[in-house]
Image: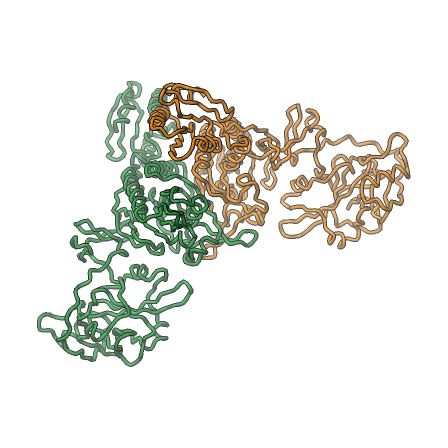
Chain colours: A orange, B green
Amino acid sequence: MFAWLPLGLKVRRKIEAIIREEMENAGAQEVHFPALLPREPYEVTGRWEEYGDGLFRLQDRKGADYLLAPTHEEVFTLLVKDLYSSYKDLPLSIYQIQDKYRDEARPRAGLLRGREFTMKDAYSFDYTDNGLDTSYQAQRDAYERIFTRLGLEYVIVKADAGAMGGSRSEEFLHPTPVGEDTFVRSAGGYAANVEAYTTTVPDAIDFAALPEPTVFDSPDTPTIQTLVDLANAQQPRSDRPWTAADTLKNVVVALKHLDGTRELLVIGLPGDRDVDLKRVEVAVAPATVEAANEADFAKNASLVKGYIGPWSATGPMLGEESATSIRYLLDPRVVDGTQWVTGANIDQKHVFGLVAGRDFFADGFIEASDVRAGDPAPDGSGPLETARGMEIGHVFQLGRKYAEALGLKVLDENGKLVTVTMGSYGIGVTRILAVIAESNNDEKGLIWPRNVAPYDVHVVAAGREEVIYDVAGSLIESLEATGFDVLFDDRRKVSPGVKFGDAELLGVPIIVIVGRSAGEGMVELWDRRTGVRTPVAVADVALEVARL
Amino acid sequence: MFAWLPLGLKVRRKIEAIIREEMENAGAQEVHFPALLPREPYEVTGRWEEYGDGLFRLQDRKGADYLLAPTHEEVFTLLVKDLYSSYKDLPLSIYQIQDKYRDEARPRAGLLRGREFTMKDAYSFDYTDNGLDTSYQAQRDAYERIFTRLGLEYVIVKADAGAMGGSRSEEFLHPTPVGEDTFVRSAGGYAANVEAYTTTVPDAIDFAALPEPTVFDSPDTPTIQTLVDLANAQQPRSDRPWTAADTLKNVVVALKHLDGTRELLVIGLPGDRDVDLKRVEVAVAPATVEAANEADFAKNASLVKGYIGPWSATGPMLGEESATSIRYLLDPRVVDGTQWVTGANIDQKHVFGLVAGRDFFADGFIEASDVRAGDPAPDGSGPLETARGMEIGHVFQLGRKYAEALGLKVLDENGKLVTVTMGSYGIGVTRILAVIAESNNDEKGLIWPRNVAPYDVHVVAAGREEVIYDVAGSLIESLEATGFDVLFDDRRKVSPGVKFGDAELLGVPIIVIVGRSAGEGMVELWDRRTGVRTPVAVADVALEVARL
């Protein structure tokens, strides 16, 4: 939680003003909901529980349950339900700029991830899927205009809607090495959050002629590389050496379900890949995921650590003990007919030539492998590169989830009750400010983009002569008359050097130095970003500033 | 807690804009604090406990205590402590417009007293008492300008600072029959909250020649009036009959202290007066007050119900049992030498001619009596009249209470550390909106004052002919070009009558009806407040609106 000082608050208000203008341009109306909300609607949608420790919960003096809203889908839905009942009232887009509260496990980096933060959240209400597409596009377009006006580089990536459900979902990421999200993109235009990346599935292979698998002794193979070395020593391939990609790695993860139960899951994937727990988490949401621990292994004798092989509830088993209670899911690359060097579910034994679809089956597939530079874009637009970004906006189609849960229906043209379909559109206002600051500074201080700078012009009176203050005063008058916000450093007991340093620190983009030549009608225009100082006649300053 | 719809929110933003302008004019800078705050600073000042059930408290995932701030003195103080250390940094006035949370026992009347509400709270920081007076006056002046611009009638009354401590304290009350506060004022200019009224103390009377008191039987005197009747029957006065004002009523109240203990208190006051519990509460703050109950009497045999007389820890006692553990406080009118008909602390017995300062003493005086029309103003400016008002602003001098508790000191001109003195200045933003609405409506709907109306002009297209929409469109263009906010009712399937009704309901002060004569270049200007409709040429509308 942070306190805002005057200049930061001014920047924030300018960001908010740009967002409001573009929301208005997108046909959205501003409303405002309480931050403190009753439990009931969140109970109905299941989110009172789903949010887990991330929700700030409290009780009032009568013992009734409340929460500090982490997001407002429920009450927006209820408001529309309260006010409207006909298709004629739709489409409707409404938004608010309001504080949100999330009891983050790891708040970090100041405003980038705080526990109290400000969001613009908009919601659209339509009674047809086409209508939702139109409303979604209007918000998406508005977001593009907003980030462009804010001077913020962005990439639109396909996103997983996660706990929110819904269909179409895109994130606006600001590319930055300090970003929390990894995303991938191809030269051909594909871009996605790694959580939303889908693996290209190879064709199945005919396995009719493949030899039977053979079990072999494999002591001292704690890593994939040691296994590969042993395979190359024991049963060298004629065409090429065995590599990690020929092995099938079986990784045990633990799911924590909402009801508190813990479920083990074994994921089979090529040995040259790693499990990306964030991708797994998206696949198994709303459960959360962690690596299995020693206790998990101790409780499940069928899990022979270091020698786990595939099994399936529906297919033949390897190993001595049944383990059907544990689900086995495969990376989509492990198609029928692929052959693998993998664990035999027997201590110190592996197996050669285990064939998918013949020797083992899975309970299903899962997008669990990490995504890497060079992987193919799923739309065929070329190999991927990876980058880091910070989420600054998110547009997604909620569909009918909330409307169904809370009973938001309207009468359509035929007098039939239909459930409303919704979109949800969020921008992190306070986070954006932090991202702008992170991207606009040098070793001397901030360099605010003009559209969000706390002031348009910073006038520095550099010297003690009275004429300096007189000239500065009339200069400021003319600047303000032209419509500029001016910050005036009129401290008389502070040296010009200190004032210049403060001006660089504060980062107003245009600095006007009124100094020795003021008496001759000359001042200097100092561009904070380039550092260039240009002499300008006092009479021309307002015009010159306007030109910049 | 309330959700804001678009038009209400626009009114609120206009109120906030006026407040911001006048804060800036008063030299105050805007900052912004979290609503969710840690317990510690409120623990240091004692308010974590003092607020009792009125505070929303919660814990984060680590079990740390937080509160939803009911007011922000503590963190403003800590901010200044964090940033400043010298008298050169002062005076400083800073403010925020932020949501506040109070878990009211009796939230009422919508926005007038909600549990989540918005306040402008400003704080001044000075290192001398004179400085505080100047800062206080600047805020007080700003408040006068704000309420004037909002078109809100107000009375400035002396207020008790209550739990806040401090010296000078004034409330801005909006006179209204639905107000929660009773205040008194004299024709000569005195005005005060009844809690702040001080009784005029009469001169003491020489009691040397007064007769001894006499005890008399007084069965069946459940009320002051029955006692007076009995007195007139048993021992009639020669000069005039006994009246209620000759009796001394002794009322038992129970204090609830912060530490949970319950203390009984007996208050002696003239029988024609009633105890005003709110005035008592101010006098005994931070304890709270309620009437004594049967259990209190049962536990204290010395309290002879219906026959309680005065006693004192320092003076002679009446009655059979000692009651020194219960404090006895007197109304300031009960000066030495006054004679009273009062209880004898013996069942069914009263006493005549009990003389204050001779026959009984008190542990002190208390402002407990109700204040009435006709009572004298304490400054001698004439008799009081009473009225009801709603608090819309409060300015008061906190003094050094918070700075001392939180260690806010600065170095003065002599290099000596001095404790800072503070002022606190609050306006209830959302309450003001409700007060304006309460004072500006008729049976058809709202009538917003121009300065805060959601729109400047409401254009109604009254009819289906295309020319009406064409004329309305170009009219709106010219109005917007002149700088007016325009609401356009362009619904084509809604009758003019319904539109007129909606326009009256919404209460935009100027309505322009574009109807049948639009083709001839004529429209009607409709003054929402007076109801007068005036034909105006389309070309003159913008000018005419500007004139209004």
B219 versus B264 height, above or below: below
Q: In which quarter of the image is residue A178?
A: top right
Q: In which quarter of the image is residue B371?
A: bottom left
Q: Quadrant of the C terminus of chain A?
A: top left
Q: In which quarter of the image is residue A108?
A: top right
| Place of residue A75 in the rendered image (x, y in percent of width and height, measured from the top left) | 48, 43
Task: Kindly identify the residue that appears in the image at 34 percent across and 63 percent down.
Answer: B289
* Number of numbered discs: 0
Task: Kindly identify the residue that appears in the image at 23 percent across and 76 percent down.
Answer: B220
* Residue sitting farthest toward the bottom: B320
| Place of residue A467 in the rendered image (x, y in percent of width and height, measured from the top left) | 34, 26
Say which of B473 and A296 sits in front.
Answer: A296
Asked if residue B5 can be seen in this view, the reply is yes
| Place of residue B93 in the rendered image (x, y in percent of width and height, measured from the top left) | 37, 42
- B159 vs A163, left or right, is left
- B337 vs A385, left or right, is left
A544 versus B99 height, above or below: above
- B492 vs B245, left or right, is right
Say which of B530 and A461 sits in front.
Answer: A461
| Place of residue A390 in the rendered image (x, y in percent of width and height, measured from the top left) | 58, 35
A232 versus B524 height, above or below: below
Asked if residue B460 can be seen in this view, the reply is no
Say which of B447 and A480 sits in front.
Answer: A480
* Residue sitting farthest toward the left: B239
